[in-house]
Image: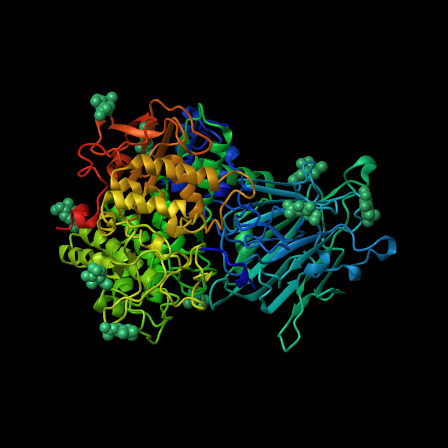
Amino acid sequence: MLELQQLRGGLLVALVALATLADTSSHPYSPDAHQPISIAQRNQENWLRRRADVPIPDPASRVNLFIGTTNTGHAFPGVTVPHGMIKVGMDTDSGNNHAGYDANPNTSATGFSQLHDDGTGGSVPLSLFKVWPFASCGDGDNNRFENCQTDINSRKVKRKLLADGSADDVAEPGYFASNLSTNIRVELTATKRAALHRYTFPSNSTTPRLVVDITNDGQQSNSLPIVTVDPSTGRVTGGATFAASFGPGQYRAYTCMDFKGVDFDLGPPVEYGTYLGNSPVRNLPQGIQEYTGYRSELGALLGFAQNTATGEGGTGGETGIYVRVGVSFISPERACANAEEDIPGWDFEGVRAATRRAWNELLGRVQVETEGVDDETVTLFYSSLYRTHISPADYTGENPLWNSTEPYYDSFYCNWDTFRTLYPLMSLHDPEEFARIVRGMINIQQHEGWLPECRGATAQQWIQGGSNGDPILGEFFVKYAAHAVALDVDPSALYKALLADAEDQPPNWNVQGRQANIWKTKGYIPQDVVELGGAATKQVSRGLEYAFGDFAVAQVALLLNNTADARKYAQRAGNFVNHWSPNVTVPGVDEPLIVGMMQPRFANGSFGSTDPRHCSVNDPTHSTCFLFNTNFDGFYESSPLVYSQFAPHDTAMLVELQGGNEAFIHRLDFIFDNNYFDSTDEPSQQIPYMYHYANAPGRSTQRSRQVIAEFFNTTPNGLPGNDDSGAMGSYAAFYLAGLYPVPATRQYLLSSPYFPAISFFNPLFNTTTTIRATNFAGNPASGTGGTVFVKNVTIDGVPAKSNCFLEWDVFEKGATVELTLTDDINVGCGGNGVDTLPPSLSTGGFDFV
Ligand SMILES: *[C@@H]1O[C@H](CO)[C@@H](O)[C@H](O)[C@H]1NC(C)=O
Ligand SMILES: *[C@@H]1O[C@H](CO)[C@@H](O)[C@H](O)[C@H]1NC(C)=O
Ligand SMILES: *[C@@H]1O[C@H](CO)[C@@H](O)[C@H](O)[C@H]1NC(C)=O
Ligand SMILES: *[C@@H]1O[C@H](CO)[C@@H](O)[C@H](O)[C@H]1NC(C)=O
Ligand SMILES: *[C@@H]1O[C@H](CO)[C@@H](O)[C@H](O)[C@H]1NC(C)=O
Ligand SMILES: *[C@@H]1O[C@H](CO)[C@@H](O)[C@H](O)[C@H]1NC(C)=O
Ligand SMILES: *[C@@H]1O[C@H](CO)[C@@H](O)[C@H](O)[C@H]1NC(C)=O
Ligand SMILES: *[C@@H]1O[C@H](CO)[C@@H](O)[C@H](O)[C@H]1NC(C)=O
Ligand SMILES: *[C@@H]1O[C@H](CO)[C@@H](O)[C@H](O)[C@H]1NC(C)=O
């Protein structure tokens, strides 16, 4: 999804158990023979063994969490376990604080809140239950409870600056820290369902105070807030109702916070109360607001005794206070229980180390050799891989909508962004979490009727295009059908969930499902049909994505031996051609080879006409092509030129429609040379690799490398646009790996990695697949030229059937893929350049007879 500034306003991870595993010890855990060990424990043990022999034993040290944390990246640099619910981090007053944080030191910190998303657009999501520290609330006698400026705009302060002018912040997997200009140091860590904050107050802070802000989520959208302080313990509980980020919904969330001294007995608060706006009221243990025209900020304020037990002469030492935070979507009691269960020992360094270990185990499954590779490329790779594993988030046990023993995941924000690359990357090295996500998606379908699409904070949000849960389930099943039952995924429930999307029209296809009825009867979405239920917009984008969704259904049907359905859906998958209008050219451009375009179509069969430049930077009308408001021309966030390249399951048909290999290559070049390629948005992601289908894989290698050189780097401004819940992270990781996935298929398009070798360890198969470039000679900085083109491929010493793609078998069984590179861009897929192309439906690919 693109950020649109004008719309602002738009496996139980046994971390605690693992915390006792010393990082350096060889094998301290001896499983009870009668107790099956958890998947997380098994994987951690595997990692302890494997990491002795791998090139990157501490991949967390190669992660730069500040990439994409200013301007429009909206990347999340705070602390989370992989796919954890709690994502604790700093919030700023930036216009780009969708993940709370902004690296720009001119912005001010406003609080340290518990839940975030990564890289989203829309309105600022989550960012709720901020904690805020005051070293003092005035000079001398004015340093009084009542004088604390508690509201968000009064209290906010800048961070300290480092010598280079950047903010004094540190972020690494498992840990975030910042020094505020008030001389307070803030440190954060987290487990899956709880956060631990550590505030270090300066020695002259006689009464260190903490605000618990109940009402300021990222949108300041709250209603019905409540807060309660227990004067004897300081425990604060509270909750409020907040607005969803990208849709009409609301959600209610609760928190529970406890306080403890760092190395001293904090005791009960010496002052406590609740506040409205900038008016803290001492000894008032409860605050409630039922808005009747007057709305003010609500929260709790606590003052604590200074730590006099440390420092010179027993007085005047810095005061450290821990805040342990639980969050729940069910109840405040559950929020307390989450915190108590996850962080019973208040062991900050233990939690931090365990979370880092969980990341190392996960990231360490992908290993790169680094000889001849600059550090920045290694950092870019592991940072991108890291961001692949922030969302969706595991909210199991926290679903307020229904009770189930199945996992519950949230922050699918949005499947339209992530189906292309994020899940196919998970397939390679993280099948167990992928399976849990799939189970969660199926469970949502069983309770809400359709698969989730753009879910956030338990609310259904706006669908961007088609029902892109379909290719995600397809991706899982194509790769793991034989292991589905072992992974607790019920194949028939998975198929039923797909059929619901494919067949049943929902009451509102703006938030779930498809405009299915007319798709089934017409094979396209007519531009001039207005139906009750959803908006009559984005018809072409939706039609093209419905076709790809049907392909995913067909793939699953085939694996279930349901050949009748497989044929039916394969046929429907071919319907993308119904939007192809053969005579359209680009206005004002003399390009005889660029004829024909995906176009809107009317119910009577004739074509509508949308300028091929529409929605691009070359659009004379400068349309944003966003959701509903301005978009009646059939396309969502990308131009007809870009959408004319979208049929991942049948690119051969696109080549044919566009006039054969030469014209196809010419069109791809035109797209790049004239700025139709949009690095900020997902529909363009596969375009650099599409030369493969015209037997010109060297050109894909070059284009994809140019994209990395031009749009991705390791600075805070190093993303071209929103990270989109890791869609951009997984995309960059694939390009650097020299691969690009075709979702819901067994094929990965092959180019050359940025490393002499890259390997993927699959913990389910217990296999490793290594792709090795035998004559690796480095990566040209400009992305152009170099010895980077693949001229020969062998798999375990046997010549591969194609130089253009790898089959899933290679990753399943574990193999060594050897690439021989050349500096000649004019390489082909091998053989006659026809039989060796990656498969397409219309040329007999995918076995639908
Ligand atoms: C911060 O503000 C200063 C002064 O206005 C400006 O010179 C500087 O470029 C800003 N820094 C960033 C990163 O925007
Ligand atoms: C903050 O200040 C402390 C103490 O001076 C220092 O050790 C630390 O490196 C600084 N930066 C961060 C982000 O913690
Ligand atoms: C504490 O000391 C700092 C300078 O070290 C000063 O800026 C601040 O005002 C002092 N705070 C109080 C409450 O005296
Ligand atoms: C889930 O079960 C609990 C305990 O029986 C019950 O209190 C709660 O209302 C149920 N939640 C839903 C959404 O049905
Ligand atoms: C489908 O048929 C194949 C070949 O007969 C068989 O190996 C496989 O187990 C079948 N799959 C299902 C889901 O029945
Ligand atoms: C495209 O042009 C051809 C040749 O001029 C013509 O026969 C055909 O009807 C046109 N198709 C459409 C959909 O306009
Ligand atoms: C088809 O429908 C469109 C839009 O309703 C209309 O403008 C066009 O004239 C119709 N074409 C024919 C051939 O009826
Ligand atoms: C995984 O494979 C390695 C050898 O590659 C072996 O040592 C180990 O025992 C295997 N683990 C399991 C759980 O089978
Ligand atoms: C590819 O490499 C293999 C192994 O080195 C070799 O046997 C084969 O002849 C090579 N093929 C081509 C086309 O160079």
User: Quick one: which residue is furthest to the left in this view?
Assistant: 849
Relative image position of residue 457 (x, y in whole percent): 48, 60
The picture places residue 826, in percent across and down from the top left corner, at 29, 32
The residue nearer to you, when weighing 511 against 284, is 511
Q: Tell me the residue at 53%/53% (across/down).
A: 116
Question: Compared to 668, does 617 lie above or below?
Answer: below
Q: Can residue 307 be seen in this view?
A: yes
Asked if residue 498 lies left or right of residue 85, the reply is: left
- Count of labels shown? 0
Q: Nearer the viewer, residue 171 or 641?
A: 641
Quadrant position of residue 458: bottom left
Task: Name, please, the residue furthest toward the bottom.
Answer: 292
Query: Measured from the top left, where is residue 777 in percent x and y?
Result: 40, 23
Q: Give the residue at x 40% y 31%.
A: 754
In the displayed structure image, the side of residue 550 where residue 332 appears, left or right = right
Colour option used: rainbow
Q: Can residue 231 be seen in this view?
A: no
Q: Nearer the viewer, residue 650 or 501?
A: 650
Q: Which residue is drawn at 37% across and 52% down?
A: 683
Residue occupying the far right of the picture: 141
| Quadrant of the image containing the N terminus | bottom left
Question: Where's residue 455, x and y in %?
Answer: 43, 60
* Above/below status of 687 relative to 600: above
Q: Nearer the viewer, residue 793 or 564?
A: 793
